[in-house]
Amino acid sequence: MSSGNKNLEKLTPKQRALYELLLKEKKGQLQDATTKAVERTIPRREDTGPAPASFPQQRLWVVDQLEGGRAFAYNVHITVQFTGALDVALLERCVNQVVRRHESLRTVFAAREDGIPVQVVLPELRLLVPVEDVSHLSKEEQDAEVERRTSEESQRLFDLARGPLLRGKVLRLGPDNHVALVTMHHLVTDRWSLGVFVRELMAFYATGVTGQSHDLPEPAIQYSDFAVWQRERMQGERLRTELEFWKQHLRTLPAPLELPTDRPRPPEQTYRGSRQFVTLPVALTRALKEISQQEGATLFMTLLATFQTLMHRHSRQSDITVGSPIAGRNVPELETLIGFFVNTLVLRNDLGGNPTFRELLRRAKEVCMAAYAHQELPFEKLVEELQPPRDLSRHPLFQVMFSFQNTPRQDLSMPGLQSTYLLVDPGSAKFDLLLELREDRPDEIFGWLEYNTDLFDVATIQRMRGHFYSLLGAVAENPDTRLSELPLLTQEEQLQLRSDFQGQQDDFPRDVCLHSLIEAQARRTPDAEALRFEDSALSYAQLDSRSNQLAWHLRSLGARPGSLVGVCLERSLDLVVALLAVLKSGAAYVPLDPAYPRERLAGMLEDADAPVLLTHEHLKSVLPQHDSRVLCLDSQWDDVAVHSRDSLPLLAGPDAPAYVIFTSGSTGRPKGAINCHSGIVNRLLWMQQQYGLSPDDTVLQKTPFSFDVSVWEFFWPLMTGARLVLAKPGGHQDPAYLVRLISEQRVSTLHFVPSMLRAFLEEPGVEKLSGLRRVVCSGEALPAELVRRAHALLPASAEVHNLYGPTEAAVDVSFWHCARGDSRHFVPIGRPVSNTQLHVLDSTGLPTPVGVPGELFIGGVQVGLGYLSRPALTAERFLPDAFSAIPGARLYRTGDVARWLPDGSLEYLGRADFQVKLRGFRIELGEIEAALLAAPGVSDAVVVLREDASAPRLVAYLVA
Ligand code: AMP
Ligand code: MG
């Protein structure tokens, strides 16, 4: 000791303070310096009747009553392997000697009238330790058997009223090879207690073998003495001050930690779990200790701060609350008892404002020091006092736990035996996630991530572990890094996101315009039927020459590359001729849907400022006041017919605008998204490569041409020699008409927004549409259940595809084939199309890992040119593409939230602006409604709030 003291003297005051802090933390004895260890002796109780349960026992007992058969996670288990000649009969005697010493191991529980459980100590309890012989099995079979028995033993429920609340079993693997399985209910034990249990067992066993006496003094008190003492102690002034501190710490209740899960959260916690092991290299541990020391913090605090950073980055929340166990044995006579003493500290940390890690560590230290000083308040008292909203689907106040043991584990040493603890996964999880680390030997840290398997896939936890390592490495390298700059992704993940998951590189012709694709097809199949509208049709040659005439005419009226031509027509042959003609003239077309309200058309006309406007005579009256020159294709066709039928030279380049489609977006008036030829050409060539339309196919054109889906409906068939059938005006909303038309015209390919697909599937006769090959969905989230319905009702030949993309990036940028029999609860939006990159970025612009939501950004050839007459908005949404090596490349910010799935496809999760507004609980009802109504496509919202008025929580919203 004296040399140790000398060493201590050499320490600086700061180092010494840290040393003392460490010592105390080790013993679980951190407490307020001012309250020292005063009047800490626990008296024996006077009577011998039932004693009240302690606070932690009470809560666990209630959990058990509530959860019934699912509370197996509250079993505490160890598996020990003995090599050598184990005397099983002696072992059994020794177990019973320990049971005799500790009343806790003889305790059962009964409900008192006031609902508080009491502990009843059985005067006698003789435990049998059965032996099962599995020596006839092969080594592999034995390993599997040990694993199976461990999870069976550790999950079998105890009868709290009848006891016993511990059990043991020995598996005999061979004459000199045994495995002991020991399970206790948490009500009568904790991890520290297991150390006591093993120590005593070893002492008795050694005595039995050698005949020498052991030196275990009789326990001075028993657990029930503690329970009575704790209840007396935790009242009045002491309770008040403790509560005051914790209520301040949790002034506003922490919002549940929303780690992105792989499956929807079951309505009730399931406790099914598994583990993934975690190991830290010695050099890393040393570096982390060094950093801890610099800040006068402990390694626990540094690991906690890193774990909280990990939770922050995965949940995108900044207010991170983590539970952490504390031994709760502040009184010396408790150190040798077996019982449930461990308490849980609620460690809440503010990770907001993007601090450096060092700053975060300081915050963590402050939080921990204050919590240690108030560690006596039982967690259950706190829950009782704070009354967090009842939610059976998660643990109250915190959902993830961090535990770090740096006291050496009780070594196993018994005469004639070599014994080791086996790390067997018990198959349970008390929390969403638990990081348990231990330092059994100096600088050697290992442990595991224990996770709920109903929420997370193993791969997700493995990735999370990789992120924990990345963070620790970066922290060790430079603790002055800001949280947002600490790298999360491993190198492999970075590579995966940057290349594996990205759209295929395809060498589609670059110098081609949209209409040139159709001109080429007209040359290949001039006589084939190109389009049909009711009883009239045009061949490819007719379509080509008509649109040439109109294009020449448009030229004469001033249409040029870069200029716009408004088109206000209903679905008709003329409509297709008009669109093609505008493109051929070098200009870009702007659809003006005659069904739109007047004000909307007026806004569009104003933005477009088109020199020419194509329409039909009867639609002239729907158009508001404007300055464009109007050409009626029906009444004024004679003026067009005088022009040449010859094709025009290629006037526009690939980067010239092809069409401008107005989208509503979430705010204000519609804005015109400008798309260029190269973007839409890429989109169409990709589509042809992917789905291979042939001249035998018929595509239905039914999407209003003011939506960009119509662009592929028009031009994809026409560039491949297939046939285009136009639905009659208004027909796209009439399922019965659609079924008839599809059947009569043998339509093979068509598009639905999911809500329309639902209505369509209701229609009798859909099962007979045997010509259907492809049902393409896009525009809104496609429910999995709808896809299953479609698969069930449509003929087997019909495939269902989910496409995703904003108007600003040439219709669609990702695609997914909905396979029959997929049992997933959602439909992915799939992988990027050719020559397209998708990025899921966090709020600081860093890629989020697989599984973690972020905002979706689009890069590549399909990104449009911006918004018509809206430079500020364009600059806000179309950013320089930092991921691209191509000069001038743009990145489009979608405002959609998505996440990568492990297979490189994407899951769509909703609108970003929408979610941000819903985050944060204390918002006025009116604000929620406003937020919902501001979301695109939402016309009505019903908000349902929890009844508990003290902490209103949004639990559901319906959108009509
Ligand atoms: P628009 O610009 O009208 O094409 O609308 C694009 C928006 O519709 C996207 O930003 C998404 O919010 C939504 N959207 C489009 N396709 C899908 C899809 N397949 N799944 C979910 N949402 C979609
Ligand atoms: Mg779209």
Image (tube, rainbow, N blue to C red):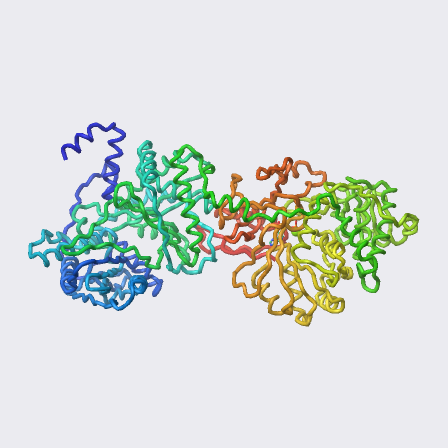
Horizontal and vertical percent for residue 81?
A: 23, 58
User: Is residue 561 or residue 226 the one in the foreground?
Assistant: 561
User: Is residue 366 or residue 488 the one in the foreground?
Assistant: 488
User: Is residue 546 or residue 36 the one in the foreground?
Assistant: 546
Horizontal and vertical percent for residue 135?
A: 24, 67
Split into 4 quadrants, where in the image is the N terminus?
top left
Residue lying at the far front of the rendered structure: 138
In which quarter of the view is residue 870 placed?
Answer: top right
Horizontal and vertical percent for residue 296?
A: 31, 33
Q: Is residue 142 above or below residue 296?
A: below
Horizontal and vertical percent for residue 334?
A: 18, 49
Split into 4 quadrants, where in the image is the C terminus?
bottom right
Confirm whether residue 779 shows in the render.
yes
Confirm whether residue 672 shows in the render.
no
Which residue is painted at 60% across and 69% down in the image?
792
Q: Is residue 874 left or right of residue 839?
A: right
Which residue is painted at 63% across and 63% down in the image?
799
Q: Is residue 418 left or right of residue 115?
A: left
Q: Is residue 635 left or right of residue 281?
A: right
User: Is residue 51 or residue 935 the one in the foreground?
Assistant: 935
In which quarter of the view is residue 868 placed?
Answer: top right
The mark tally for this picture is: 0
Which residue is painted at 23% across and 62% down in the image?
166
